[in-house]
């Protein structure tokens, strides 16, 4: 599993030990979660029960004050137990971390929400829509917010609302016509007009319940408009999104462990011993661990640079690059694990076929590969132009 060189503090070790107590329980349910496309509700309850939801909340507000690096460490481990649970929790951890690191809301709202998180509240951004695709591509949301006295009336439909069964709050983007801007509203799921339509029917990450969020004349207070462009503070780079590749790195680790165990225990009668003695099997294992090591150093390097205030402002595309490299390495690792195991890896009872489907989902989480490559090119061209000027 995770190399000890990445575990740097006693606090990290303590929380990894806490997670370890759920390893067998979470692993034992993964196949059923996938097969029946059911949300891992009990897993999430277990994690909320030990305070996992408040890990990225600052210490002074009652949380654990975990950094991006700390979050990645735990999320990778959790994902090796169950990817659906990890991604569902990761979105909330990442949003909370970003909110408080960058002070995105007014202080009274942040203080209020900190208390909600301490009491187990989970949150996710709801920004994607069928007509606009990923919000990272700049499409204007069809969801609208109209001012009515000291309230806002919100109408629209959001897609890909991961962890929809357990979210307490939806941080929802909407077009505000009178301001000609996109704003984010904090919407409590208990409000009238808020509902979930179960539309999630995919072959990857089937247990995340990334359903549609429906907003039908939802009335929120004026103060629930928590984010506008002029409110923004801090840098544009968001290291908390590294929870996404951390999830797929955990899946890759699980695939690697299965393949290595298979190599050590599978002994066809054509051999005098297990297949681990075969050069082609050793080649595949070596290539798997090479990819895993590369991916791990990239993601933890990016996380460390982001957490360090002396280097954070120097970052340009490193977080996006880490997501690109780790996600594609995870796909390669699972593919090689399946080649090693052979046709048995395609059996529905074999976890490798689930890992194979799950890591593909990473390609469609933000930022997408083509956007990362384009930004790298534009950055290089701009730097060269500025140098010549």
Image (tube, grey):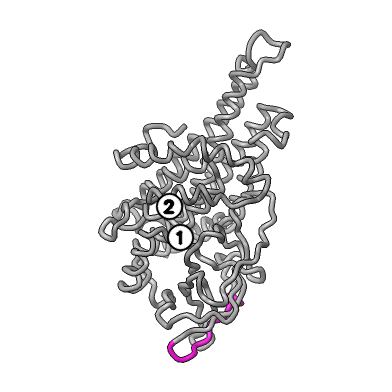
Q: Please indicate, yes or no, whether residue 245 appears anywhere in the rendered image.
A: no
Above or below: residue 113 compared with residue 15: below
Residue position for label 1: 122
Q: Quadrant of residue 263?
A: top right
Q: Residue at x 56, y 40 (%)?
A: 251
Picture quadrant where residue 163 is located: bottom right
Query: Viewed as shown, does residue 334 lie left or right of 235?
Result: right
Q: CA distance from mark 2 to mark 1?
A: 9 Å
**Residue at (31, 73) in percent of width and height:** 108
* The C terminus, quarter of image: bottom left
SS at mark 1 in the image: loop
Frontmost of labels 2 and 1 is: 2
Q: Considering depth in this image, is 2 or 89 the residue closer to the camera? A: 89
Drawn side of residue 297 relative to residue 144, left or right: left
Residue extending farthest bottom: 149
The earlier-in-sequence mark between 2 and 1 is 2
Which residues fall within the magenta stretch?
A: 140-150
Label 2 element class: helix
Residue at image position (47%, 55%) is: 241
Is residue 335 located in the magenta-colored stretch of the structure? no
Q: In x, y percent, where is residue 372?
A: 54, 56
Q: Nearer the viewer, residue 116 or 358?
A: 116
Report the residue at 65% width, 50% height from top.
37
Residue 291 image position (x, y, % from top left): 54, 35
Residues tagged 2 and 1 counted as in contact (Cβ below 8 A): yes
Please determine whether, in this image, residue 242 is positioned above or below residue 291.
below
Q: Which residue is mark 2?
A: 48
């Amino acid at each position: 599993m995770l190399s000890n060189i990445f575990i740097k503090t006693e606090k990290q070790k303590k929380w990894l030990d806490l997670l370890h107590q759920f390893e067998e329980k979470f692993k034992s349910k993964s196949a059923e979660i996938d097969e029946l496309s059911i949300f891992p509700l009990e897993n999430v309850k277990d994690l909320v029960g030990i305070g996992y939801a408040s890990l990225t909340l600052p210490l002074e507000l009652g949380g654990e004050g975990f950094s991006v690096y700390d979050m990645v460490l735990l999320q990778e481990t959790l994902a090796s137990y169950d990817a659906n649970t990890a991604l569902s929790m990761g979105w909330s951890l990442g949003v909370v971390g970003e909110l408080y690191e960058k002070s995105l809301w007014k202080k009274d709202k942040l203080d209020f929400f900190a208390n909600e998180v301490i009491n187990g509240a989970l949150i996710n951004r709801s920004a994607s829509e069928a007509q606009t695709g990923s919000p990272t591509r700049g499409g204007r949301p069809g969801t609208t917010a109209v001012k009515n006295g000291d309230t806002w009336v919100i109408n629209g439909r959001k897609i890909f609302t991961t962890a929809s069964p357990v979210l307490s709050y939806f941080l929802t983007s909407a077009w505000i016509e009178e301001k000609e801007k996109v704003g984010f509203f904090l919407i409590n799921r208990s409000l009238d007009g808020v509902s979930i339509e179960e539309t999630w029917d995919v072959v990857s990450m089937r247990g995340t319940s990334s359903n549609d969020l429906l907003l039908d004349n939802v009335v929120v207070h004026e103060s629930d408009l928590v984010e506008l462009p002029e409110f923004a503070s801090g840098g544009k780079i968001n290291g908390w999104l590294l929870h996404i590749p951390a999830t797929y790195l955990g899946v890759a680790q699980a695939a690697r462990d299965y393949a290595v165990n298979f190599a050590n225990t599978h002994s066809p009668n054509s051999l005098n011993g297990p297949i681990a003695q075969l050069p082609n099997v050793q080649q595949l294992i070596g290539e798997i661990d090479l990819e895993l090591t590369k991916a791990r150093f990239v993601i933890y390097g990016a996380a460390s640079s982001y957490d360090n205030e002396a280097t954070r402002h120097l970052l340009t595309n490193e977080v996006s690059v880490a997501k690109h490299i780790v996600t594609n390495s995870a796909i390669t690792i699972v593919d090689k694990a399946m080649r090693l195991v052979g046709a048995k890896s395609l059996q529905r009872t074999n976890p490798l076929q689930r890992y194979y489907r799950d890591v593909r989902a990473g390609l469609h989480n933000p930022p997408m590969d083509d956007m990362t490559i384009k930004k790298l090119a534009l950055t290089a061209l701009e730097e060269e132009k500025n140098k010549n000027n």
